[in-house]
Amino acid sequence: MQPRFVGRLGIADVVTVANAALGFCAVAAATVDPGIAARLILLAAIADGLDGVLARRYGGTEAGKHLDSLADVASFGVAPAALVFAAARPTVVGVTPATAAAVGLPALFVAVAVTRLGLYTAEDAGNDHTEGVQTTLAATLLAAGYLAGFSSPALLLAATALFCYLMVAPITYPDLLVRDALVLGGLQALAVLAPDAFAGAFPRALLVAALAYLVLSPRFYWRAT
């Protein structure tokens, strides 16, 4: 007997579930080396972009949008939360406010990411825009920031708290045009392959590009209407 998914999932769906597996790998890596976890999160972000390209090229399936959100929970909800907790782990000493922040903020990030992805699947899937910061963008910023050297627990926890609000904020973000998605994907790939090259130039460039989109795109992003 064949598994029930044989013949029902497309090539884009295969990349999507691989994205979910990368999310687990990032969580596992965070317990050993948060830098590796950050690179795996960026690799998952590349896979997240690739499955969209493949779906447009070869067609999607009915399960596609649901698989995409489920995979994103792992890769851009749980994995970045594990990265932040791993970075903040040295501050966890007994029952203290620092411990509450180190555990509570990543947990809140996961809860908000799940909420945001559920709303996206129900209301925004198929549009050329979405409300609230994308989980992929939030995860990319946390991972790129860590690789770029902005890895202090206080800074990462503050960024996590900010994204908990921005992911569900009533701010409209346009989808990236293909050319810009390719540029961002290229920076993500370079940050994964050579995070320390040229004094960390690639993660820093990715961080700047992602921050520019975060801050400027709701008002100034050039796109077809």
Image (cartoon, rainbow, N blue to C red):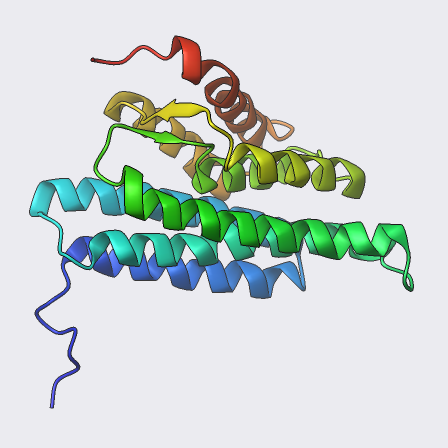
Q: Where residue 120 sits in the image (x, y, percent)?
A: 35, 43
Note whether residue 43 is visible: yes
Quadrant in the picture for the N terminus: bottom left
Residue 132 percent location from the top left of the image: 45, 32
Which quarter of the rendering shows the C terminus?
Answer: top left
- Is 116 situated left or right of 161 in this image? left
Q: How many marks?
A: 0
**Taking 154 as reference, is 14 above or below it?**
below
- Residue 92 is situated, as x and y percent measured from the top left of the image, at 85, 58
Residue 214 shown left or right of residue 220 in the figure: right
Identify the residue shown where x is 49% and y is 21%.
209
In the image, residue 4 lies at what x, y percent? 15, 79
Q: Horizontal placement of 204 versus 20: left or right?
A: right
Instruction: Please give the name of the residue rendered at 64% of the width and 56% of the height, measured from the top-left corner.
Output: 107
Q: Image point 41% across, 52% down: which residue? A: 72
Q: What is the quadrant of residue 162 in the picture?
A: top right
Which is more toward the observer, 19 or 32? Answer: 19
| 26 relative to 135, above or below | below
Q: Is residue 83 visible?
A: no
Give 158 or 80, whichever is nearer the viewer. Answer: 158
Q: Residue at the location (54% across, 55% down)?
A: 79
